[in-house]
Image (tube, rainbow, N blue to C red):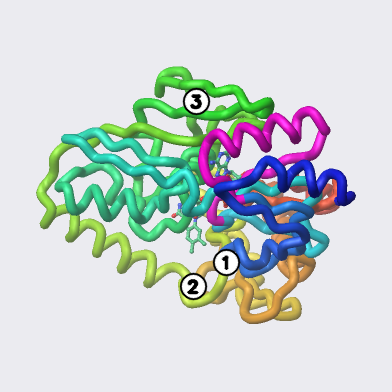
Amino acid sequence: MDPGRQTAISDCVSKGQVLFDEPLSRYTSYGIGGPAEAFFQPGDREELARILKLASQETIPVTVMGSGSNCLVSDTGVPGIVISLADRLNNFHIEGGRVTAGAGVALGCLVRQCLQAGLAGVENLVGIPGTIGGALVMNARAFGGEISTCLDRVRTLTGDGKEQVYRREDLQFGYRSSSFRPDEIIMEAEFHFKAGSPETIADLQQQFLNERKARQPLKQRSAGSVFKNPAPDVAAGTLIDKAGLKGTRRGDAGISAKHANFIINCGQATAEDIAFLIKLAARTVKQQFGAQLELEIRTLGFQPGYWEDAGLDG
Ligand SMILES: Cc1cc2nc3c(=O)[nH]c(=O)nc-3n(C[C@H](O)[C@H](O)[C@H](O)COP(=O)(O)OP(=O)(O)OC[C@H]3O[C@@H](n4cnc5c(N)ncnc54)[C@H](O)[C@@H]3O)c2cc1C
């Protein structure tokens, strides 16, 4: 990024932080990813709006990240400004059954606070990493429960820094999808929960955590499930397993022997290593079973068309 642009960005930031050529491997659950040209952690909403306005005026590309637990970032990094909201915009307020949470609050914090307050509705999401913003964009879901069920309202900033408020009924949520526009940044959400017995909620949470531990390779770095399930009764992991790919390695990347839809970083894997296994799995499943897999994870910083040879949209 040229020094003039760096100065213009730095001039917008006083409460937060901006770092140039910052490795994104520090901010993803994979521990993988090249540098962001500018890596911005906003101090408050006004600063975020200022940066968005500048980016829009100067046509600087903007990418938003929560805690990077559903992202594969390329080894060459991401051009423009990467806005990281993990632990930023982290206001949190509970009153009765209503909760207001900033986009950068950890989903785990919401789950924990609801347990403490005896509020039921998000216990199924225990153990899912990430932020409230990421959970809403991805419509985080587990064990039959999803984040959008308890949602009332969402406050966003559009690409040019304007604020927008949505009621739940203005939004659509699907399987790991939502109707937020790609240039929209979630800033805050309001939820409602019903009263529940803390003992019952705690028991359910423990049950869900045990199931996660039994089924998922939680000791290795990953971004969770790589592919969406092709149908409600057809798991992508089962197809990859049946194709004989469990345990396949490429460098330090591997298709987990525990859960074939998890492609893990066993040490110093690169994004190219992970991408190789993603493409191998997609091509092999297509050849053997005729099913075209679709990516669940979001890919950042890859060249247009990079995923096409495996029939994937990156
Ligand atoms: C071990 C493991 C287990 C997992 N299990 C599950 C599971 O059971 N169920 C499930 O649904 N997911 C699961 N995931 C995936 C992931 O944790 C969720 O998708 C999570 O909600 C992503 O949140 P994040 O903050 O990390 O988002 P990121 O990965 O940082 O971003 C995901 C997407 O959301 C966008 N985004 C993030 N924040 C904002 C914002 N404030 N405004 C606008 N856009 C934003 C990003 O641009 C990106 O497109 C798992 C991941 C891991 C590593």
Label 3, secondary structure: give it.
loop
Q: Say whether disc 3 or disc 2 marks the residue closer to the N-terminus.
A: 3
Q: Amino acid under label 1?
A: Ser
Viewer-proximal residue among 83 and 29: 83
**What span is colored magenta in the figure?**
41-67
Q: Amino acid under label 3?
A: Gln
Residue receiving disc 3: 172
- Does 273 sit above or below residue 46? below
Q: Is mark 1 within 8 Å of ligand 1?
A: yes
Mark 3 → mark 2, Cα distance in angstroms: 31 Å
Instruction: Tell me if mark 1 has few (under 14), some (14-19) or many (20+) residues whose alpha carbon lies within 10 angstroms of its own.
Output: many
- Left or right: residue 145 compared with residue 158: left
Q: Label 1 near label 3: C-beta < 8 Å?
A: no
Residue 290: percent from left, percent from top: 71, 49
Instruction: Kindly tell me whether residue 81 is visible in this rendering.
Output: yes
Q: Which mark is residue 222?
A: 1
Viewer-proximal residue among 242 and 159: 159
- Does 52 sit above or below residue 42? above
Question: Looking at the image, which residue is at 38% across and 65% down?
Answer: 212
Quarter holding residue 215: bottom left
- Left or right: residue 196 compared with residue 233: left
Residue receiving disc 2: 217
